[in-house]
């Protein structure tokens, strides 16, 4: 896994133009069964992939925290939302709450998340490969191919199965 993770950004960079063209065509003419296919590809990949052997998303990027996330997680810590924000978050250039730093504060050395049960929505949905209207979030998916080995594999399999 380490070797694949090390080479992943370069592999994704090599495929970026190809992926952009693919997603551009997909956006114009998405197959009727796209959402069903994406759930199938997602489930196939995650039957083989164990996120605990990787956790690259938690090590290299941080999620956006919605107001609901902040309220739920601060309640978990028995903190006031403002105190949680001051302790763990900052506003980014788009005025979204994000972690003050990466790797994620809540990631353990064993790759387990200490707030897994109350984790942010962005973490629960990552890498977004089984979302409805998948073709509408192509930029996120192209970006995620450089971070998540499963996302990379899903996009590659998708290109093999869908001819646009």
Image (cartoon, helix red, strand yellow):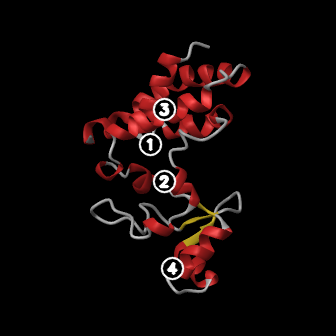
Quadrant in which residue 44 is drawn:
top left
> Label 1: which residue?
147
C-alpha separation, residue under disc 2 versus residue under disc 4? 23 Å
C-alpha separation, residue under disc 1 versus residue under disc 2? 8 Å
Q: Residues within 10 Å of mark 2 (few under 14, many from 20)?
A: some
Q: Residues within 10 Å of mark 1 (few under 14, many from 20)?
A: many
Q: Earlier in the sequence, mark 1 or mark 4?
A: 4
Q: Is residue 148 above or below residue 86?
A: above
Q: Earlier in the sequence, mark 1 or mark 2?
A: 2
Rendered residue at 44%/38% (across/down): 43
For discs 3 and 2, the disc positioned in front in the rendered view? 3
Place of residue 113 in the rendered image (x, y in percent of width and height, measured from the top left): 39, 64
> Label 2: which residue?
61
For discs 3 and 1, the disc positioned in front in the rendered view? 3
> Label 4: which residue?
76
Residue 40's disc number: 3
Q: Residues within 10 Å of mark 4 (few under 14, many from 20)?
A: few
Pointer 3 and pointer 2: residues touching (CB < 8 Å)?
no
């Amino acid at each position: 896994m380490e070797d694949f993770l090390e080479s992943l950004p370069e592999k994704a960079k090599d495929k970026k133009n190809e992926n952009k063209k693919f997603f551009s065509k997909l956006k114009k003419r998405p197959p009727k069964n796209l959402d069903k296919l994406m759930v199938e590809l997602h489930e196939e990949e995650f039957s083989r992939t164990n996120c605990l052997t990787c956790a690259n998303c938690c090590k290299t990027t941080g999620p956006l925290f919605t107001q609901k996330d902040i309220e739920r997680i601060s309640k978990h810590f028995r903190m006031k939302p403002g105190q949680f924000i001051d302790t763990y978050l900052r506003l980014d250039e788009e005025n979204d709450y994000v972690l003050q730093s990466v790797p994620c504060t809540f990631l353990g050395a064993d790759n387990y998340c200490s707030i897994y049960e109350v984790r942010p929505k962005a973490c629960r949905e990552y890498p977004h490969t089984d979302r409805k209207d998948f073709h509408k979030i192509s930029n996120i998916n192209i970006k995620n191919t450089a971070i998540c080995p499963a996302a990379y594999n899903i996009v590659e399999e998708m290109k093999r199965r869908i001819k646009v």
